[in-house]
Image (tube, grey):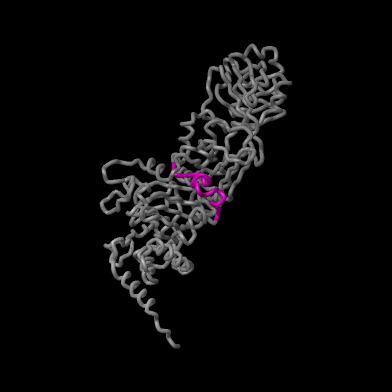
Amino acid sequence: MRRRAMSALATTGLAALILSGCTPGSTNPTDPSAPDGTASTAPAPVVSVVNDAVADTDSDAAQHQDTAPDQDTAAADAAPSAGADSADSADAAESTSPANGTGASDSITVDAGEKLALAVDGGEFVEVRLIDADHDSVPVDTGTFPTGAGTDSDSTDAPGDANSADGDSTNPDDANADSSGTTDEAVAGGTTKPTHGLVDTEGGNEETSGDDAGASGDAETGSSADNATGTSGADGSATSGADDSGEADGGGSAESTGTEWESSVDLVTGATYEWEATTVSPDGAEHTATGTVSTPATTAQEELTAKTAIADDQTVGIGAPIVVMFNSTIPEDARAAIEARLSVDVTDEDGEPVDVEGSWGWLYDTDGISRVHYRPKEFWPAHVNVEVNMPLEGVEYSPRWYGKEDVELSFEVGRDQRVVADASTHRMTIERDGEEIADWPTSLGSAKAPSYNGTHVVMAKHEFYTMTSEQWNYETDVNWAVRIHNNGEFVHAAPWSVGVQGSANVSHGCINLSTDRAKEYFDMALHGDPVEITGSSVDLTTEHSDISDWVYSWDDWQELSALS
């Protein structure tokens, strides 16, 4: 092929271009200290799983080799160079890979029954989120940052370091609240002031909707090429160090929390978790790393079922707690991991979320049966829908027992109806949606068998019922009996006491009404309607009842949580 001679103008232009490329100008944008004239940026921090792997991950590494180019691309984008060729890009990508240089892997298997622990090298944590990849209802675990993490002399100080070495101590709970942004968010069950690191899946990330937190976990874990895929460390732990497009001149806005993190609760058996860690490098740039851990299936041999006192699609009163009963005893050391998987979501009639503060509480075992209840801080709002999710299938409770199946419950809270029976005035009033609809004469417990002050709830209804008492040696048939406590207190028809209803207390502790009024109340009562007794000489205690939830103060109730 014949080459065309270059014109004088083209030759002159080429010479000028070569000269300008070889001669530094007064406005050279590159860092003069960099040996190749490229912009100086810190490599992305590397996040590692600290837990020991319990299975060989070589097969996973081979299976996921195709993720390495994405990581290289992200790393190369994090360190652009002026006039860099393909070799320079490869060098930039290699600079963000783990030092061990082993093959890429985005999943390892670790033991259940222990907390997940992560560590970061070359930076500090800002936030970590642990997500159950198979159940989007399980609250996100934002975990805790151990006190003093990242404060030793070997750690790298990052802008805004919450654990700086100036001697100021940082409470780990405070650090967690600040870094994870959960203080003002809804957490498991709608609590707005969490005492642990569990965050409602819909409220845990303002940029991610609950629908995006599904089994695929893409929205939560950032599995796109712009984020890191894990690489296998020498000890089999998953590591990651890719950039999520944080700017090199990040300005130090990130609040770092140290170099160590651990989950709030133990991992459960037969589960897959996805973690997403936001880190900050010494130059102030934020980075995102992701990875996956799995746990082995349970080796327990016997199934354990969980039942709820409320039926699916039932309409209940505003005082109805969510009662979950297991058919055996749950060891105390397994309760936190179980409770952490339970979620309660409340919506109005239009399907819009309703913020309800509430908490789970483990009540004393009865006849070898463990039970956990959920109650709001105040009564439920009227006319809301409640969804309860309990993904417990395959979850090991003890070396003997494991969860038989997942449990889901959906129920409706009806109108706001409240009863007050006053032993001093001998009156029973009924208020519905803020308006008094009844004021009836009644007779409560006598001086020798007084009714109990406090908030009761409707537990069951019987059109016909036989009252028996060994203490008072009687057996009496009654109509329209509404049970409000396990101690024998009912609201029921008592035609024999109509003459003194409104003027004297003559019962053995029940609330006596005329037959017509008893039927009217029977017909309107819902499971969970609150019935408050006042003006008596004795008070309810937290013992001897299936439902004593409203006897506890809110502070005392929260102490019953295994996560408190």
Image coordinates of residue 380 in percent, x first then y, are: 58, 33
Image coordinates of residue 190 in percent, x first then y, are: 52, 39
| Image: 342 above or below 356 | below
Q: Nearer the viewer, residue 115 or 508?
A: 115
Q: Nearer the viewer, residue 435 or 23?
A: 23
Of all residues, the one furthest to the right in this rendering is: 516
Residue 198 part of the magenta segment: yes
Q: Nearer the viewer, residue 396 or 121?
A: 121
Magenta part, dominant SS: loop
Residue at (67, 14) in percent of width and height: 501
Quadrant in which residue 476 is drawn: top right
Tell me the quarter of the image containing the C terminus.
Answer: top left
Quadrant in which residue 350 is drawn: top right
Q: Nearer the viewer, residue 443 or 25?
A: 25
Tell me the quarter of the image containing the N terminus.
Answer: bottom left
Image coordinates of residue 367 in percent, x first then y, are: 55, 38
Residue at (54, 34) in percent of width and height: 376
Image side of residue 23 versus residue 345, left or right: left
Image coordinates of residue 246 in percent, x first then y, are: 40, 55
On the question of residue 302 being in view, the answer is no
Of all residues, the one furthest to the bottom in this rendering is: 1
Of all residues, the one furthest to the front in this rendering is: 8
Residue 60 part of the magenta segment: no
| Image: 501 above or below 138 | above
Region of the chain picked out in magenta, as a range: 196-215
| Image: 321 above or below 271 | above
